[in-house]
Image (cartoon, rainbow, N blue to C red):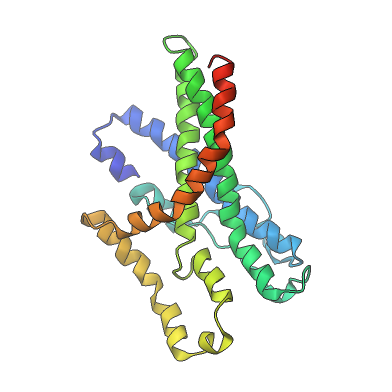
Amino acid sequence: MIIDLFRQGLSIQEIIYYLIIFLFALTLSFSVHEFMHAAVAVWLGDPTPRNMGRLTLNPIAHVDPVGTILLLIAGFGWGKPVMYNPRNLHRFKSQRGMNIMVHLAGVTGNFVVGLLASILAILFGSLYVKFNGTNGEIVFKALYEAFEYTYQFSMMLLAFNLLPIPPLDGFHVLEELLPYKFKSSDFYRKFQRFSPMAIWVLFLLSTFTRISILGYAINVIKLPFEWLINLICMPFYTLLQMAGL
């Protein structure tokens, strides 16, 4: 992110302004993502996330220092994974189903954040246009951009985590559907060990070349979720128009 800001030739004040907005979007998206993992695991019967201090929206509990620094500098990073004990899950009969619920909780949280951020971005964007040239212009512009970036980042985080690559949530969901015999094989263990390197390879290709396979995959995955959010937001557009905004 910081690299992109310097490449755009922005002033120091503009870079600081957008860094604050990025931090807001990043903090909210990551905190809700990890909190949802913890909340669903606790709801299903496992106290581990609560005991480890992860049942909170406090971003400090979910920050991975290296992952956060990389995300701010290069736009690629990670939060601190929520640990849980599958053996403690007992609310429902299906162990596999409960594990899938825990793994999908984070991206579900990102979808909700993306939806709310989209609605707020529409609202503040309309107010920004309406009050253009007045004292309220700067405030509404900042709020619009903050929630627009939050929407974009939440959708990116949702799609990225649904990639079927270890240790991402999409892989863990797929893993629950694989036969036990396959999961206990040597091939599978080697695949788990080395496949995370694929993310770094794809990221480096996207950063230093024009081959953006990772970006293309993320855009394809998030497309239906963005379509659904736009569909839900259509009545809100209508209400704003009726209100003269």
Quarter occupied by residue 39: bottom right
The residue closer to the viewer here, 148 or 219, is 219
Residue found at the far left of this picture:
209
Which residue: 64% across, 64% down? 102
Q: Is residue 139 visible?
A: no
The residue closer to the viewer here, 12 or 86, is 86
The residue closer to the viewer here, 184 or 194, is 184
Which residue: 51% across, 18% down? 127
Q: Quadrant of the N terminus?
A: top left
Residue 40 point in image, percent of width and height: 69, 59
The residue closer to the viewer here, 102 or 15, is 102
Q: Is residue 238 visible?
A: yes
Q: Is residue 186 above or below residue 122?
A: below
Which residue: 31% across, 30% down? 12
Quarter occupied by residue 205: bottom left
Residue 156 point in image, percent of width and height: 44, 50
Image side of residue 39 versus residue 24, left or right: right
